[in-house]
Image (cartoon, rainbow, N blue to C red):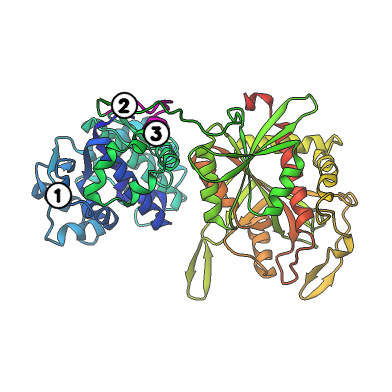
Amino acid sequence: MLRARRLFTHFFDIHLLAEKGACDLPRLAMEMRRAFRFALLLADHVMVPASSYFESALCRAILDEFHPDHFAEQISFVASGANLDEFVEGKLSQYGAAEVQGQAYRAGGLATAFPWHGRSRSSTQDIGKAWQTGMELDGQDRIARAIRDRPSDLDRRLAELPERLGRSAFIAGNAARILIGDAKPTLQLTNRLLSTINAAYFDSYALDLKAALVQELVWLGSSQPLPSGDPNHDIDYRALVGACRSTGVLGDVDRTEPRELLRLRDDERFVLACAAAAGTAQANQLYRGIVYSMPTIEVQHTPPRTDATKVLVVTALPEELAAVLSTCDAHRTIAGKGDRAIYRLCDYVLPDKTTRKVVVATLSDMGKANAAIVTATALQSFPDIEHVLMVGIAGGCPNPAQPAEHVRLGDIVISDHKGIFEYDDVKLKMGEVERRGSPQLPGYTMLQALAAVKADAFGGRRRWEEVIDASLPKLREADDSFERPDPSTDVLHVDGKAVEHPEDKRRRPGRPRVFGGGVATGDALVKDPKLRDELRDRYGARAIEMEGSAVRTASWAAGKDSIIVRGVSDYCDQHKNDEWRFSAALAAAAYARALIEVMPAEWFE
């Protein structure tokens, strides 16, 4: 990974934060700070957008660590305008006094701690041109679909938006007002405007400055690489973090005093990490034009071959991991590339004697934060993975009034087209809770696999039942807890009283019934039948769990497909106990294997 001449720090932009939701500021701040330190280590000249510094307290806090006396040669502000005064004058014409940005520029006392680099181009004009080009392609329909009550002249408003903005800033809020007037924009509209405008804004700067970027960010990243003015010198953030962690230098990157930071350029561990991140097998790589006289060091990770591994299974609990391992034909412990997690590499041998290799990761504790970190780290360590399954137990949403929809203990619930719903994303009002989450769909390829398993079942082959029967003998040798409990222990209470389960001809005695449906997810252990029934009736939830949305989001951010497979262990009420949790975990693990087996062989090539 060679040094860049210039690098533009796009990740400081406040509109990028708005696009990402800024829902976890500590993680965002950590990633910004680390990305900025990588930039200083790997670029001669780091260019910070002046608007970010004056408009974002987060940017100022990070940049203020670095004193101009020591970093004036490495850091500069960049903006339209020959100097700060001209820049502020332009901003005052773009933002009104009531807007947050306008208030920042009217506060007075603004000063630049670092040298100023003026641009001859206008990002507003560049965004306008990109907008017109996008509207000529498919951008118009994409924006229009996000507007609920469309004005009759919407097409004209879209086409004339740059002109109607005049001297106002080309930002999502201003664009929305032109498109829909005083109506409140939907979150979907705001996000589509942000993504469209942000991409054009970064494109304007990076290409104009001929500057490299920090790509492949985790929390602030995008599904597609950003346009770069120097792509050969872009920093692959994920790869570099993993490599620095592997060589033991990541802590030094994070904690070294700013005035000592540049000494890490000559640290052998950092040089090795750069070589590894660039895909180089030897540490005596050219760096800063100097050949380091280091012994050749091979950069390796897991001894077992994992390039044919296309599937990741994530579990949250030890019993869920045990259930998954019991369903495979062989497994061994492996380490990932650049992280300290322990993984299992499982072999599923198919009837035609071919083998599907699957990586299994488990959390150190329950919850969405842990699930997101484990999933994101695993996908970084095993980049060939394309499909992610969250497998384990959940609370069920029974519906005794509707036998066809009545979920019982030991049943299996898979997230289908009704998606995964984050029920704890709420707005708290006076005496009211407004749920703001929207369903997140599983990946298309996973829905295809689900359809294939269902089709097999209509033909009489219920592969998951075969897997359960084959796995139980292995588990009995150590623990009989995974046996399916007696049906008499499946007791449902309604209004505090035990009720009979409805007659259901679809059920097979002693076997789990399989449901597709919505999965409600949140960072809470639910023992509230009122909430359970609300999520069932309003959102089509068949199960309630804790980690699914985090696994889905981490997978989506990495461009991977995902699906949730859950065994029902309780009814989310005060009678919750552990009677069915082991059997439910095995049922989910067995269905996960059935999904993996129906995947085409070409997916594993």
Q: Position of residue 74 (x, y in %)?
A: 18, 41
Mark 2: few/some/many CA within 10 Å (<14, 14-19, 20+): few
Mark 1 highlights which residue?
Answer: 68
Check the picture and name the quadrant holding the C terminus: top right
Residue placed under numbered mark 2 in the picture: 293
Residue 82 in view here: yes
Asked if residue 414 lies left or right of residue 215, the reply is: right
Badge 3 density bin: few <14, some 14–19, many ≥20, Cα 10 Å: few
Magenta stretch bounds:
274-287
Left or right of 45? Residue 278 is right
Quick check: 447 left or right of 491? Answer: left
Q: CA distance from mark 1 to mark 2?
A: 33 Å
Disc number placed over residue 225 in the picture, else none: 3
Q: Dot 2 lies on which element?
A: loop
Residue at 30% across, 48% down: 12
The three-letter amino acid code for the residue at tag 1 is: Pro
Q: Give the percent coordinates (x, y) of residue 268.
A: 34, 36
